[in-house]
Amino acid sequence: MLAKHLSIAEIYTTARSQEKRDFLQRKYRIPAECIFNSRDTSFASAVLAATKGRGVQVMLNSLPSPLLQASLSILAPLGYLVKIGKKDIKNNSLVALEAFSRGISFVSLDIPSLLRHHRPVMHCVLGEISRLIKQQDVKPVHPITIYRMQDAQDAFRFMQTGGISGIRRSITHWLVAHSAKNLILLSRSAGDFDLEKNKDSSGALFVHKLRKIGYQVKPISCNIALPSSLTMALRACKDNGFLPVHGIIQGAMLLRDAIFKQMTLDDWHSGLQPKLYGTWNLHTEFSQRDSLDFFIMLSSVSGVVGIASQTNYAASGSYEDTMARWRQFQGLPGVSIDLGPISDIGYVSTSSKVTERLRKDGDFSMLNKDIVLRALNATVLHPLGARSQIIVSLNSSPGPQWDVNGRLQLGRDARFAPLQPRNKTSAPSGDSQSTSDSLSLQLAKASDRQEGAGLIGAAIASRLANIFMAPVGEIDLSKPPAHFGVDSLITVELRNMLVLQAMADISIFNILQIASFAALAGLVAEKSKYLQDV
């Protein structure tokens, strides 16, 4: 509007969607060949081509880095760039100074600073704005929807993926407690949320109760890993008046656990689909600046620490962590919360055996839903904060997890060293940990392989007792692994201990197919580098 008011002959603009391009052509009569793509830096070469290499004299810019750098490159000599966005300034982003060799000027427009430090100038500016509005040379932003103050909460809609079971139901409660009156629930099983068809469904009853007390809830059957399915879901939202969406919580997940050597290609892809493909599809649909207030991904600490039987899940969690950083780099909201085991809700809470085992493992701190919701609250309040990744489950308290020769990753991985308490020793605790940790020293002193096999058998028994929470005396080494219900995860744990402590090159299949644990102890003794010369 200002450019047209000043009778500027050549006006070039950028837009991130076809809808915005159509609007610029229809409302302001900007020719299609003068509207360029601001999703990437391609607009720079297009503008230079349109201006025969001259560039533009004045630019009003709100693009973040690196698009800002591309914008500077197309300023004509002695040109002006007026920056109206604040994100790069708040983040102290860097700008290459090469463009300034052409005598260009970079101006940051900040109304509050003008008001504080130059009130007379601000008075003149407001007077000029009033005159332009009165003469209708400038008009209010269009299109815009106006809500009354008492209806303000109706202007915001929030989308949650992954259904409403476990922690996701607590998040839904949290959203409505914070005045989110319009909720979109995307789930492959959203059909189960219909109370008329599923009277015994807890999810359907939950949705019914929310609607009964005045909340607008729209469950939609959708596989977000499929672009066509997500597009159809968003179209359904639009048809039912549930757009625009102002916040997304991506909580979709699918577990297909198996150690990597035994994981099928189908299991690998199945584990990736909700978090990797689903997250990318959501990003693609909501990649316009200012389209969302927050974009939160419920990721997993397995992507940070690594869990032997969850390589697919760990990979998809790492992808979400990277996506959060990339979105913030693009000036878009994006935060990943790396969750660990939650003790009072969901799968872990239903199994005391799993809970106790995770407590003993040491790498993870057990969470509760209140901690998760506090982390969620922080990300909503600071969607463009400096931290794109929040890890809430690593066990930073003193304990055996910090032993550099132990089986746990925290002590063996230098990335976590800054988390280690400095005023406490991290010596192993518990009989089983002491036994396995001292196995290498014992084998180095063994007089023959028979003695070594006995030491290895004792270490195996001690580790199994720790895993199964049973007295060491109840571990019969004459029995095969299947007798104890040894699964692939336990097999990996045993192998890691024996490779590290006995210096024996054995495979997972050696353990799974062995006739007994006593035979395994003998096999390890034969392969142990400590026992080659005895």
Image: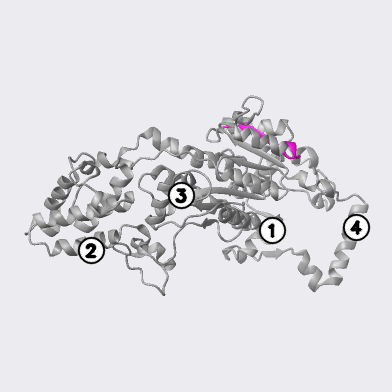
**How far separated are the C-alphas under marks 4 and 2?**
81 Å
Which residue, given by chain and number where applicable, does mark 2 sit on?
438
Q: Nearer the viewer, residue 487 or 430?
A: 430
Q: Nearer the viewer, residue 114 or 22?
A: 114
Sequence-earlier tag: 4 or 2: 4
Indicate the secondary structure of the residue bearing disc 2: loop
Residue 149 among magenta residues: no
Residue 221 among magenta residues: yes
Seen at 35% across and 40% down, the residue is: 258
Camera-near label (3 vs 4) is: 3
**How far separated are the C-alphas under marks 4 and 1?**
23 Å
**How far separated are the C-alphas under marks 3 and 2?**
34 Å
Quadrant for the C terminus, please.
bottom left
Sequence-earlier tag: 4 or 1: 1
For disc 4, the neighbor class at 10 Å (few under 14, some 14 to 19, many from 20) is few
Seen at 8% across and 62% down, the residue is: 447
Q: Amino acid at mark 3?
A: Ser
Res 73 seen here: no
Indicate the secondary structure of the residue bearing disc 4: helix
Sequence-earlier tag: 1 or 3: 1
In the rendered view, does 203 fall on the left or right side of 521? right
In the rendered view, does 311 fall on the left or right side of 277? left
Residue 85 tag number: 1
Q: In the rendered structure, which segment of residues is drawn in magenta?
A: 212-222
Q: Amino acid at mark 1?
A: Gly
Camera-near label (1 vs 3) is: 3
Q: Amino acid at mark 4?
A: Ser
Which residue, given by chain and number where applicable, does mark 4 sit on?
130
Image coordinates of residue 403 in percent, x first then y, are 32, 64
**How far separated are the C-alphas under marks 3 and 4?**
52 Å
Indicate the secondary structure of the residue bearing disc 1: loop
